[in-house]
Image (cartoon, rainbow, N blue to C red):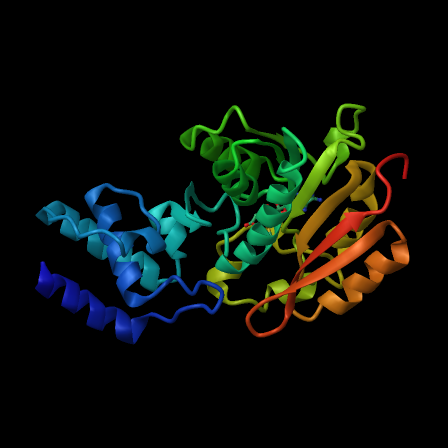
C-alpha cells in the first residue's frame, strides 16, 4: 500500500498543477480522496486527509489508476470524488453546479456572524440564498444555526436539483427549501416582501469575454452560467443591489461576494443607490475586498 502511494505521489508531482482557488487540493489530499473513491467512499479532499486509507482490492487499484488518469487529464477533483467541503459541511458536488471555493467561506463567515447577531433578537431568522449552486451557503448556515430558515434558489435547474439532493442528504428539510428563480422573480409575494433578515449571494461576476481565458480545468468543466456576469461582470450584482431591499426587513442585510478589483466600484453603486444605511467591505488576507455586506435603510415598498 505504501509503495503504491509513493508511486502515485511521484507521478502526480510531475503531472499535476494546482489552481490557486482550490488551496485544499495537494498531492496528498488528491491521492487520499481519490483512493477513498476507488474504495467506494465519496469524501472531499479536505476531509480525506483526516482518515487512514482503506486497503484496496486489485479491482479497486485498477479503478484508482483510472480516476487518477481522469484527474491528470483535467477533470476537477471534486467532480471525481463527488464531494466538496464547505465550512465543515460535506456536499454532493458534480458538474451540475460550481465547486464551492474556500474563498467563499469569507462570505459564509460574515453571514454567520450577522445571523447570530439577528438570532439574539428574533426566534426565527429568515435567510435567502440566491444563486445557490450546490446550496453551500444556505446549507452551511442552517447546519450551524438551528433557528434559521433558508429559501435557496438558482436560475439553473441542475443547480436546484443538486441543492435538493444536498438538503436531503444533510437532513435539513425542516430548515432549507429550494426553487428555481431568476434572482428574486419567483419570490414575488407578500409572504416574502419585507420579511427576509439576510440575503446571501455568491453571484456570477466574471465578464463574459474573460471566461474562455480561465484555466481549462474551470472553463471546460464548470457551468458557464456560474461565472457569466455579462459584459463587465456586474450584471447580476447590480440587479441584486437594486432588488434585495424590497425583500429585506428594516435593518436586514444583503451579503455578497465580489471579484478581485470590483469592490470599490460596487461600494459606490451601493452608496449611490441610497438603499443602504451601512456598507461594510470584508477583505481577504491580502487586503482585497471580496465581500460586501450592506444593511438596508428601509424595509418595505422600495
Ligand atoms: C458563482 S456561482 C455560486 C454558486 C454557490 N453559491 C457557491 O458559492 O459556490 C453563481 C450561481 O448563480 C447562478 N445564477 C446565474 N445567474 C443567475 C440569476 N439570474 N438568478 C439566479 N441564479 C443565477 C448560477 O447558476 C450559479 O449557480
Q: Nearer the viewer, residue 220 or 3?
A: 3
Q: Nearer the viewer, residue 144 or 35?
A: 144
Q: Residue at x 42, y 65 (%)?
A: 23
Quarter of the N terminus within the rendering: bottom left
**49 vs 135: above or below:** below
Q: Residue at x 76, y 47 (%)?
A: 240
Q: Residue at x 38, y 46 (%)?
A: 83
Image-based side of 251 in relation to 274, left or right: left
Number of numbered callouts drawn: 0
Q: Residue 238, image x and y in percent?
A: 79, 53
Q: Residue 81, image x and y in percent?
A: 33, 48
Image-based side of 18 in relation to 196, left or right: left
Let me know if residue 195 appears in the view.
yes
Q: Residue at x 87, y 49 (%)?
A: 275
Q: Residue 109, image x and y in percent?
A: 56, 52
Let me know if residue 128 appears in the view.
no
Q: Residue 301, image x and y in percent?
A: 90, 35
Quarter of the C terminus within the rendering: top right
Amino acid at each position: 500500500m505504501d509503495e503504491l502511494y509513493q508511486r502515485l505521489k511521484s507521478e502526480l508531482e510531475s503531472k499535476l498543477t494546482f489552481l490557486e482557488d482550490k488551496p485544499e487540493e495537494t498531492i496528498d489530499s488528491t491521492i487520499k480522496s481519490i483512493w477513498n473513491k476507488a474504495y467506494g467512499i465519496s469524501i472531499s479532499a479536505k476531509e480525506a486527509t483526516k482518515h487512514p486509507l482503506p486497503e484496496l482490492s486489485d479491482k479497486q487499484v485498477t479503478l484508482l489508476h483510472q480516476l487518477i488518469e481522469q484527474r491528470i487529464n483535467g477533470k476537477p477533483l471534486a467532480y471525481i470524488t463527488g464531494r466538496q467541503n464547505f465550512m465543515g459541511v460535506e456536499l454532493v458536488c458534480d458538474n451540475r453546479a460550481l465547486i464551492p471555493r474556500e474563498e467563499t467561506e469569507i462570505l459564509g463567515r460574515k453571514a454567520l456572524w450577522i445571523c447570530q447577531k439577528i438570532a439574539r433578537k428574533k426566534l426565527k431568522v429568515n435567510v435567502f440564498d440566491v444563486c445557490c449552486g450546490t446550496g453551500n451557503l444556505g446549507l452551511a448556515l442552517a447546519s450551524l444555526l438551528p433557528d434559521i430558515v433558508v429559501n435557496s434558489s438558482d436560475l439553473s435547474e441542475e443547480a436546484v436539483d443538486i441543492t435538493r439532493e444536498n438538503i436531503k442528504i444533510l437532513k435539513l428539510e425542516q430548515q432549507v427549501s429550494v426553487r428555481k428563480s431568476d434572482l428574486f422573480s419567483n419570490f414575488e409575494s407578500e409572504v416574502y416582501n419585507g420579511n427576509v433578515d439576510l440575503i446571501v449571494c455568491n453571484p456570477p461576476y466574471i465578464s463574459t469575454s474573460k471566461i474562455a481565458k480561465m484555466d481549462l480545468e474551470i472553463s471546460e468543466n464548470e457551468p458557464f452560467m456560474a461565472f457569466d456576469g455579462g459584459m463587465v461582470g456586474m450584471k447580476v450584482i447590480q440587479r441584486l443591489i437594486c432588488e434585495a431591499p424590497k425583500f429585506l426587513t428594516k435593518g436586514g442585510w444583503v451579503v455578497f461576494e465580489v471579484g478581485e478589483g470590483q469592490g470599490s466600484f460596487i461600494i459606490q453603486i451601493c452608496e449611490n443607490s441610497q438603499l443602504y444605511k451601512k456598507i461594510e467591505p470584508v477583505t481577504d488576507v491580502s487586503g482585497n475586498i471580496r465581500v460586501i455586506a450592506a444593511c438596508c435603510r428601509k424595509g418595505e415598498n422600495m
